[in-house]
Amino acid sequence: MADLSGTDLSEELKKRQKRPWGDLHKSGKIGITPELPETLGFYDINSVRREQLEHPADPSLTRFISAELTRGYFLEHNEAKYTERRERVYTFLRIPKELEKLMTFGFFLCVDAFLYVFTLLPLRVLLAVLRLLTLPCCGLSGSRLLQPAQVCDVLKGLIMVLCFSMMHYVDYAMMYHLIRGQSVIKLYIIYNMLEVADRLFSSFGQDILDALYWTATEPKERKRDSIGVIPHFFMAVFYVFLHAILIMVQASTMNVAFNSHNKSLLTIMMSNNFVEIKGSVFKKFEKNNLFQMSNSDIKERFTSYVLMLIVCLRNMEQFAWNPDHLWVLIPDVFMVVTSEVAVDFIKHAFITKFNDITADVYSEYRASLAFDLLSSRQKNACTDYSDSVARRMGFIPLPLAVLLIRVVMSSIKVQGALSYTCVFLFYLGLVTLKVLNSIVLLGKSCVYVKRANMEDKLFERPSTAPSSSGKTPNKADQASCTTPSGESKMEQNPVTPCSPPPCSSFSVTTQPTPRSDLFPPLPTDPSPATLATRSPTPPPEPRQPAPSLSKEEECEAQGASELKHRTPKKDLLEIDRFTICGNRID
């Protein structure tokens, strides 16, 4: 009994000495640390509660809000990322300036090619006709009557005269009223169709003209081969006439939009430019594709300016050349020009942003256009300057020049000696403007080419470009083809910058000799003495098994092989000069 009573007393003392918050410590609701004050073996409960309020174990709304308000971070931990973002902003802001430099240079290139048709082309045709008339009288029957460039000039002059005479049968006033009677939606659809048709005509029209020039100037063995020039000539006349009518319909549609009372059609036509942003911004572009789009924008801007000039001439004629009506047209012209420029800025800025293209690429485009200008002015040039601009930008000046002459002749009546004197003075002014523009463009082109370090390429030997039709090359093409590194398979003679390349030093039938350093020499017939003295060949070493590659190494090897066989990107100067770059339809 005594033992039992003793054990009961000890258990009761233990219960009294038991801490009431011990279970809380076990449950984890209160964290007791040795730093808390202890009084007679007991921890201070007030200190425990105070510690719980300061550092609660469970999250609360107040603690979350205070953490959100006082949370910090350091941008320098990802310095490269934020520096790249800042450079993107700077590039985005630089795009309008660099783009406008390219647009200005390309615009004056189009002006130079357009003025050439009115100023120097008539003089060149006159000189060719004089040579054609005087050469037989001089007794030089063995030489050619006309040089190839003079033949092309005469063909251009004949095409313009025939198309101008055919345009007299097209009534501009009837076309204007026919278009004005249509609804707004119909006119909007018609305008979009005309814009697409203009690009298609430009892309195929230059091929027609090139085919005519080559058919007329290629060496012929028999005189009857010259008959093939006739169908090509009529095809070119028909094309220029249709293209001129197409541009006339575009000008009539814009004239209707300018003269509409509520300006709804003009607003819809301006909104069409912003639809172009949707169709081009979210596509993948490389440098060459952006170059094509830039050329297309240059040609489109110049064409729109000429169309607005035609519209202003027609409106001023209808209002008897009243200067007050000109101030009515200026706001509409300003709206169209502003929307065109704004759309180009936004489109190019976001295309360069989404495709990680720097703003310096526009200086490369400007240097490439300058290279075209300088290469067409060389002594051994293979094309005329105006044709080079037409191929690069898709701008063909002949249809637009025919339409402008037709509108000016119908709008301005020339009567009397004073009027003809004014016309002659105006022609001299155009010639002066053309010469000054050409001089400035040549100077700027030399500067741009030197900055881009492309002046050595002006004197390089032109390599044979692969045909775009995918046909099998003939023997001449196989003999002159080049390796991917740009070096010819046959030995080339050094070419001095001032001398023409020695094309006649190569033979078409000569086969390239195999390189002896790649293969060991073939053994001759061995004699018994040499066989006896020849040391025995050592046995081949056993091939070691190839080590097994991990998955990451296999992926890296596969990626390296893909990069090795991937087609390299073309340089801007490696693009074919006969490629129409300015007629892309997105």
Image (cartoon, helix red, strand yellow):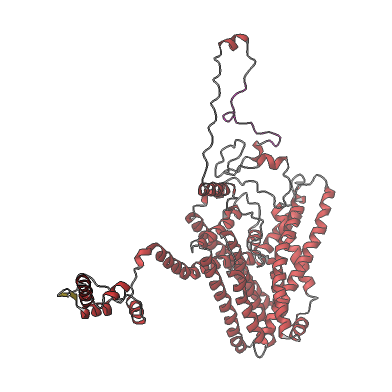
Above or below: residue 142 compared with residue 26: above
Residue 110 in the figure: left or right of residue 224: left
Q: Quadrant of residue 477?
A: top right
Tell me: 222 left or right of 259: right
The reply, left or right, for residue 495 in relation to residue 412 is: left
Q: Which residue is farthest left?
A: 40
Tag count in the figure? 0
Q: Percent position (x, y) of residue 242?
A: 77, 70
Q: Nearer the viewer, residue 137 or 444?
A: 444
Is-magenta flag for residue 395?
A: no
Identity of the residue drawn at 72% across and 50% down? 470
Residue 473, horizontal then vertical, whole percent: 72, 44
Decide if residue 334 is in sight here. yes
At a point 79% along the width and 66% down the height, the residue shown is 238
**Residue 414 in sight here:** no
Judge by depth and name the residue closer to the eye, 463 or 353: 353
State the extent of the magenta-drawn residues as a range: 507-522
Magenta stretch: dominant secondary structure: loop
Q: Position of residue 137 (x, y in %)?
A: 77, 51
Residue placed furthest toward the right: 224
Where residue 121 appears, as percent x and y from the top left, is: 67, 62
